[in-house]
Image (cartoon, rainbow, N blue to C red):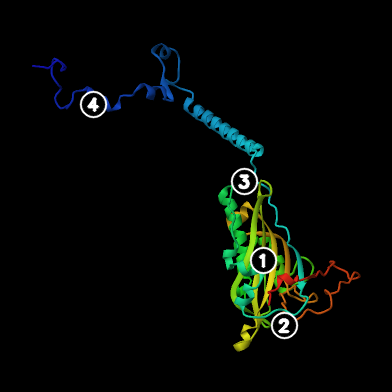
Amino acid sequence: MAGRRDPPEGTPEGLPGGGEDEYRSVVFDESFVRAARLQEFSAQERMAEHSRAVRSLPAWGRRTGAKQILVLVLLIAMAFGTAIYLGIRHPYQTPAYKPAEPLRITFIPLAPQGPVPGGTPADLYAHSPAANFRIGAAGINLPGARHTKSFSESQVMMALTTAKDYLVESSLDPDVLTGGSVRPVRLLLDPDQYGQFDRSMTSPAADGRHAASGWLVRYDPAKVALANPQVRVQGTLRVAEAGPDALEVTSDHTFAYALRPAGVNGTRAGDASLFTVRRELHFRFDRDDLRQHRAEVLVSYVQAGPQACSADTTGVLRPLLAGERGTASGPAGTDPYATGRPTAALCGTLAPGAQPSP
């Protein structure tokens, strides 16, 4: 007996699902029919005189695709134009590059009024104003770092730390002090100052720009040696904002070095003397300097003694050692008729209280 869905005659023989199943896979849905490029004329239209039984439909899909591409191009152009406009009108533009300024150097030798006192380093330090100074880098204290209007606390601390590192390398490194190397100091400079620094090391001049003694403390190893590598130090560091794109750090430190003649040993090794150097440096840090751990050194004001006023200190410092006296002559002469960059020789007198007492 046939089921409810079977035809009265049953399923035709030889066909697994009946006659309709044979064409089920080729049944066209409504979307397929609408997308067809050819359409058959209706019965009424076929009664008329036509040479073709079908007609072509307009390519709606192709036109629609072209419209979509055009709209997409217009949207991209609008987005690109908006981005350009916002970039031009953005209130936080990247600041223009500002090259580092050249270092300005002032160096004043301090001449003693009598013979330079001598003794062991310990005795000299104990009977001098440096008696309570700290040793080495411990004497370069960092103040508390606070954020400014344009710089975070960590950026302020980075500026102070870099300034301290420069002071340590240029004033305390034994290899730098004895003329063995300048690389540790150079690595902490802004690359814009490399040319001025290199010329100051290779061809120093008393022109206020190219004296090696403005960048670092250095002695002639053929004449002077360190009697004690533990340098006494005391001073201050101050930081201030110099606009929205720069920080400035000012350092003011006094360094007391125990020196002796080079090549002297044995009983005379105790005939040391103190040599005092006061360095006031002005550093500038832009945001690139802070990221790269480097500094721009803008001003170097140095006082050093005991030293003869007439000594040439552009390349190395020339201390007067134990028992030596300053010459009666004043500073090196300045010729007002000379052409080129004007130079002026400066000299001061070392106060008696700055020397170790007997």
| Label 1 environment density (alpha carbons within 10 Å; few <14, some 14–19, many ≥20) | many
Of 71 and 257, the residue lying toward us = 257
**Does 197 sit left or right of 227 as displayed?**
right
- Foreground: disc 3 or disc 4: 3
**Does 9 sit left or right of 109 as displayed?**
left
Q: Which residue is mark 2?
A: 323
- Foreground: disc 1 or disc 4: 1
- Within the image, what quadrant is residue 101 found in? bottom right
Q: Residue furthest front?
A: 358
Q: Amino acid at mark 3?
A: Thr
Residue 2 image point, x, y percent: 11, 17
C-alpha distance separating marks 3 and 4: 84 Å
Q: Are marks 2 and 3 in contact (CB under 8 Å)?
A: no
Residue 206 image point, x, y percent: 79, 70
Q: Is residue 128 above or below residue 296?
A: below
Q: Residue at x 60, y 51 (%)?
A: 156
Q: Is residue 324 above or below residue 134?
A: below
Q: Report the number of discs.
A: 4
- Foreground: disc 3 or disc 1: 1
Q: Amino acid at mark 2?
A: Gly
Q: Which residue is mark 4?
A: 22
Q: Residue furthest left?
A: 1
Q: Amino acid at mark 1?
A: Thr
Q: Residue furthest right?
A: 337
